[in-house]
Amino acid sequence: MRVLIVTDAWRPQVNGVVRSLEYMAEQAPLFGSEISFLTPERFRSFPMPTYPEIRLSLTRPEIVGRMIAQTDPDHVHIATEGPLGFSARLACQRQRRAFTTSYHTRFPEYLSARLPVPEKWSYGVLRWFHREAKAMMVSTRSLERELSARGFKNIVRWTRGVDTTLFRPRHERVLDCAGPIFLYVGRVAVEKNLAAFLSLDLPGTKVVVGDGPAREDLERHYPQARFLGALTGENLARVYASADVFVFPSLTDTFGIVLLEALASGLPIAAFPVMGPVDVVGSSGCGVIDADLRKAALSALEISKDRCRAYGETFTWHESARQFFSNIQAAHANT
């Protein structure tokens, strides 16, 4: 099966959406599929207001429709609700092509954190966007329940995985700072609630890996924390393995692949009792989920790294891809 994935999120962005899609392309041959991408690389673009790292494509449904027709895929998967996603949705309807979608990001919450836009308005638009999809893929049971309650239909599960060869415990420690080391990895933006982590009274050192529009302000307000900027590959994996606890202060993430990377690296999780951490950590004993984030971070220090590593190894990209392609095949069969 030839699958075309349309996505507004793409390199050089470093986030869970991009990584998930890249791994799906790698795994595709194992499931009798071939993936091609329609991304912002093929269009003129402009920086998203308040978040210039993300670029929005300048295009129209007619242009995207021609590109889809030229590719002539067996199936179209629309990964994001951006300009490319909206154009692809309309193009697929005009061409009477069945398509699936996925729900990665809680845009209503992100938007309302920046602009005075009621969440119910944004959810109304998203319901319309996903309504005609043969299936809408979500990462967790919690997200499925929430979106079902908001009127979304045709929801199926697509979990995530982690590269356990890259992300693993290591003897070397590349962070030359006082321990214990409490680590955060991800976008440095208002919706990530980083101040809730950086303001905690904790021993040792707080380390932030990532970049984003809030970085300059947070560095100024929390000079004792170490900000390392965006890291990838071996450089990122070594930092994970050098920390003691992974702190995840976000209240709005739908999953958090960084949680899996931390667990595979042997790090226990400290987080609020919200979607994402609740689903990933669950009853594994590999993290502390508590409304008191300081208490969670300190208690997590007592958790065995070996236990976290063993649990992290249960999340594979192969299983993630199996779910993804099974969802597509089932949707395709029902067209």
Image: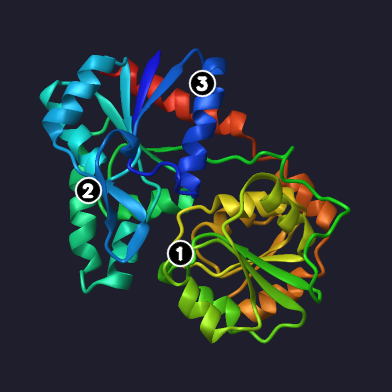
In terms of sequence position, does the residue under pointer 2 or pointer 1 come before the other? 2
Frontmost residue, 330 versus 241: 241
3D distance between C-alphas at marks 2 and 3: 29 Å
Q: Quadrant of residue 100?
A: top left
Q: Residue at x 56, y 54 (%)?
A: 279
Q: Quadrant of the C terminus?
A: top left
In terms of sequence position, does the residue under pointer 1 or pointer 3 come before the other? 3
Give SS at disc 2.
helix
3D distance between C-alphas at marks 2 and 1: 28 Å
Relative to 211, 68 lies left or right: left
Q: Amino acid at mark 3?
A: Ala
Q: Amino acid at mark 2?
A: Arg
Numbered disc in front, either 2 or 1: 1
* Location of mark 3 (residue): 28
* Location of mark 1 (residue): 212
Q: Position of residue 25 (x, y in %)?
A: 49, 26
12 versus 208 height, above or below: above
Q: Position of residue 286 (x, y in %)?
A: 73, 58
Q: Amino acid at mark 1?
A: Gly
Numbered disc in front, either 1 or 3: 1
